[in-house]
Image (spheres, helix red, strand yellow):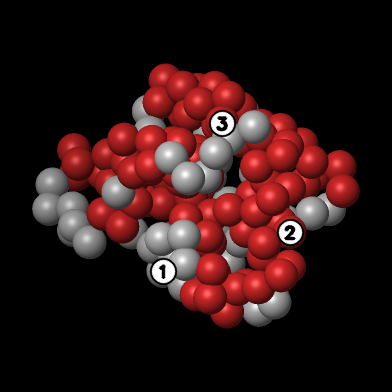
Amino acid sequence: MDFVERPEHLPRSHREAMQALTVRMRQPDTRGLITFEDLVLHRLLATPEGRREAGAFVEDWIGILLAYDAQRQADLVHTLGVYLDQGGDYDATAAALHIHRSTLRYRLHRIRELSGHDLGHSDTRRNLHVAVRAAVVAEPAVLPTSE
């Protein structure tokens, strides 16, 4: 965390703090501290233009899954994010989600079916992972804030 040593740096510091707060409030678990330096990918999307581009990217890659989740109160985008965070490891993903492997298999099948994306391709997995992460900062907001 950077400390502001000069008054003229206050606007940038405030902007960065607000971006970190926005990301934290749009994540499933809003507890804990996050700093601008922790944002990594989100920092690339920190500009208004970046957030708009993120929105288009998210819509292209996981828009159908977001709509399905909203319509059916499902959790496919979260499942996909955890699966990708776990490097595609079924056991680790099922444990992290507190579900049975067969439930995970069903959800991943549904994700493939709805999205038309093959999770076996590394480029596809990478783009889906970026889309899940970018959904947190996309404008217009594609993930509900936790308020």
Residue farthest to the left, as pictured: 5
Secondary structure state at the residue bearing disc 2 = helix
Quadrant in which the C terminus is drawn: bottom right
Q: Nearer the viewer, mark 3 or mark 1?
A: 3
Instruction: Choose between 12 and 64: the one closer to the eye.
Output: 64
Number of labelled discs? 3
Q: Residue at x 86, y 42 (%)?
A: 71
Residue farthest to the right, as pictured: 72
Q: Residue at x 83, y 53 (%)?
A: 73
Q: Residues within 10 Å of mark 1 (few under 14, many from 20)?
A: few
Q: Position of residue 87 (x, y in %)?
A: 41, 60
- In the displayed structure, does residue 87 sit left or right of residue 78? left
- The residue singled out by tag 2 in the image is 106
Q: Position of residue 112 (x, y in %)?
A: 65, 42
Q: Which mark is residue 33?
A: 1
Q: Nearer the viewer, mark 2 or mark 1?
A: 2
Q: Residue at x 51, y 26 (%)?
A: 57
Give yes or no for contact between labels 3 and 1 (Cβ–Cβ under 8 Å).
no
Res. 36 in view: no
Instruction: Choose between 65 and 101: the one closer to the eye.
Output: 101
Mark sitting earlier along the chain (2/3) = 3
Q: Residue at x 73, y 48 (%)?
A: 110
Residue 62 against residue 21 in the figure, above or below = above
Secondary structure state at the residue bearing disc 3 = helix
Residue 99 against residue 42 in the figure, above or below = below
Q: Which mark is residue 61?
A: 3
- In the displayed structure, does residue 129 sit left or right of residue 29? left
Q: Position of residue 55 (x, y in %)?
A: 55, 27
Residue type beneath disc 3? Trp
Mark sitting earlier along the chain (3/1) = 1
